[in-house]
Amino acid sequence: MNIKKLEAVVEAILFTMGESVEIERLAAAVEHDEDTVRKIIRNMMIRYEEEDRGIQLIELDGSFQLCTKPEMYEYLIKVAHIPKKHVLTDVLLETLSIVAYKQPITRLEIEKIRGVSCDHAVNKLVEYGLICEAGRLDAPGRPILFATTEEFLRYFGIESLDDLPILNQETIEDFKEEAEREVMGEDA
C-alpha cells in the first residue's frame, strides 16, 4: 500500500470511528508498524494545519482523533443543535484540578484537600465526562478511585497529563494561603 492509500485508510478509520483510536489499533488495521503509522499521521496533521480545512487531527494520550477545528464551531451551530457547554464553576475547577494532579484519588482524599464535602462537584464532573471511576482502593469499604478522562484532555486541549503545568512549592504555598483566607472570610 502506498503512502496516499495509507493516509486514506487512516483518515477513513478516524472519520468513521468518531472518537480517538489507539495507535496500536491503527497500525494493526493498516498492517504496518506503529512508528510508520505515527509518521504518516504526523504528516497528515501538518497538512491539515497548513491547508485551509475545517478538520484537524489531534493526539490524545497515544490515540488519534479526527475532529472539527474550533474556529468552525460558529458555523456548525447554525446547522446542528447548539452543543451544551458545561460551565465549570470555581468549585468544579478546584475539584477537577485535585483529581488531575493526584489521580487516582478517592472522594475522601479530595475532601481532605478541599476541606469541604465534594459530592456535588464529583457527581457533576462525572456527569460532564471529565472524570470517571478508575477502580477501587484496596482498603476498608473499598472506596471508589477517580481519574480524569480522555474528554478532560480534549476539553483542555492537551495531549496527555504530562502537559499539565508543573506547580512549584511557592505556587502551592500561595494557593494554601488564599484558601485559608477564603475559609476565614477575608477577601483574597
Image (cartoon, grey):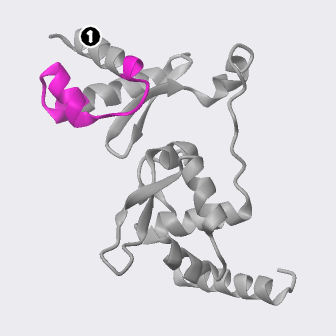
Place residue 187 in its image quadrant. bottom right
Task: Give the labeled residue for mark 1.
Answer: 4
Place residue 47 in its image quadrant. top left
The residue lying at 36 percent from left, 73 percent from top is 142
Q: What stretch is highlighted in magenta?
A: 14-37
The residue lying at 23 percent from left, 15 percent from top is 6
In the image, 141 versus 57, the foreground residue is 141
Q: In which quarter of the image is the C terminus?
A: bottom right
In the depicted structure, whether residue 10 falls above or below residue 122: above
Image coordinates of residue 91 in percent, x first then y, are 70, 66
Residue found at the far front of this picture: 141
Residue 49 in view, yes or no: no
In the depicted structure, whether residue 4 falls above or below residue 31: above
Residue 179 belongs to magenta span: no
Image coordinates of residue 110 in percent, x first then y, are 54, 75
In the depicted structure, whether residue 88 falls above or below residue 187: above
**Dominant secondary structure of the residues highlighted in magenta in the image:** helix
